[in-house]
Image: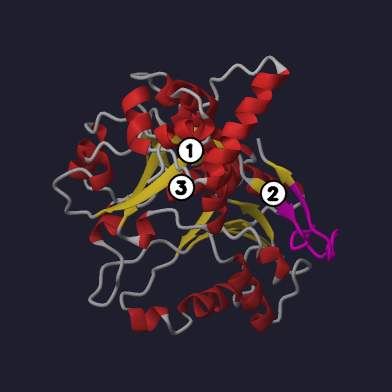
Amino acid sequence: MVTMDDIARRVGVHRATVSNVLNGKYKAERSDAARRAAYIRRVAEEMGFRPSLAARATRTGRTGLIGMIRSVSKACAVIEPEFDSGLDEALHARGYSLLRDLIPDDATEAPRIVRQNAIDGLIINHAFGTPAPIRELLDRCGLPTVWVNRKRDADCVRPNDYGAAQVATRFLLDHGHDRVAFLDPGIHTSGPDIEEPESVVRDPHYSRGDRIDGYAATMADAGLKPDIVSLQRPTTLAESKAGWLLKTFVAFLRPLDRPTAVLCNADGRTMLHAASIVGLRVPQDLSVICFDTEASADERTAVDRVLVPYRPMGMAAVAMLCDAISQPGSTQSPIVIPFEFHRTGTVARPGHGPVNPLGVSSQSLA
């Protein structure tokens, strides 16, 4: 392995000069000093020099690495390309790299990257269903930490689900709908073949309640009675694979006294499919808006939606953690990120056609 001493001998300077140049501490105020610094960097590159993280950690007390741990259950963590994109962009801008690790629900000790003191700070990607011993274990790890997609009093980054539900509901009301239903697919009930961990059933994600509360409050403010339809999910994987959600939506739409508009907690495109089966026109007969998680979904089937801000959440988590690293012992106030509102034409006044039949417009929700 090439060392700074090797470079110093090749160039004919003191090791301290090489160290200052490669660590950005060399003051090249004169032209000859600038040429020397450029020459040292070129020789280091030609010789294949790679800085030692261990040496830098010893010198600065920092490793230049941020860790992220997530639940072994995919249902309990954010696993989205847009989230990773936000993380990567923010880490690169700040000169950090990322180490990933898993933490099982039956863990009795901190993740390896924490035990080995390999990181400067920790992003916890365990959004819900976290057993109390695990939460206590992570709170005691002694590192600056940020929880993502989790509702806590401090040190967390999450979307504004309550506010997004308010905006989506108000959008329907402003289009003249006074019979607006909130359709909630709910969570898996326990069953012999369901792969969701028991903790998911016991401790549902905060967003479900926040979205229902935001919808209900907006309806009540308008003097209207909320219509919250909670669907019973299948108890077996065989049932869940048999198109149960589409069948349930079709059954919901068949009665003549159905609502004129629906806010879907998820699966808005399944609702569009169900409407076509029943013979309803969207938006003339039924207006549809939904919560959505996939940034590029408009390219397939567009639906009015409020989009979960995964990319901004990843960027905000890194920014918050870097602030915590630079201020040891500090507590960071929660960051609540607005959703993005996509209008595509699936909401209109009852009996009217779409205002924006083929286009897509978007705006950030404060």
Location of the C terminus (image quadrant): top right
Tell me the CA gap for discs 3 and 2: 17 Å
Q: How many marks?
A: 3
Pointer 1 local density, CA inside 10 Å: few below 14, some 14–19, many at least 20: some
Q: Nearer the viewer, mark 3 or mark 1?
A: 1
Q: Is residue 145 magenta?
A: no
Mark 3 residue element: helix
Residue on which disc 1 sits:
96
Looking at numbered disc 2 in the image, what kind of residue is underneath it? Phe
Q: Which residue is mark 2?
A: 341
Where residue 230 sits in the image (x, y, percent)? Answer: 44, 61
Disc 3 and disc 1: Cα gap in Å?
30 Å
Q: Residue at x 65, y 48 (%)?
A: 168
Tell me if label 3 and label 1 are in contact, CB under 8 Å. Answer: no
Q: Are marks 3 and 2 in contact (CB under 8 Å)?
A: no
Write the residue at 21% across / 43% down: 110
Tell me the quarter of the picture where residue 294 sits.
bottom right
Of label 3 and label 1, which has the lower sequence position?
Answer: 1
Give how far across and how far down residue 350 sits, in percent: 78, 61
Residue receiving disc 3: 207
Q: Magenta residues?
A: 341-362
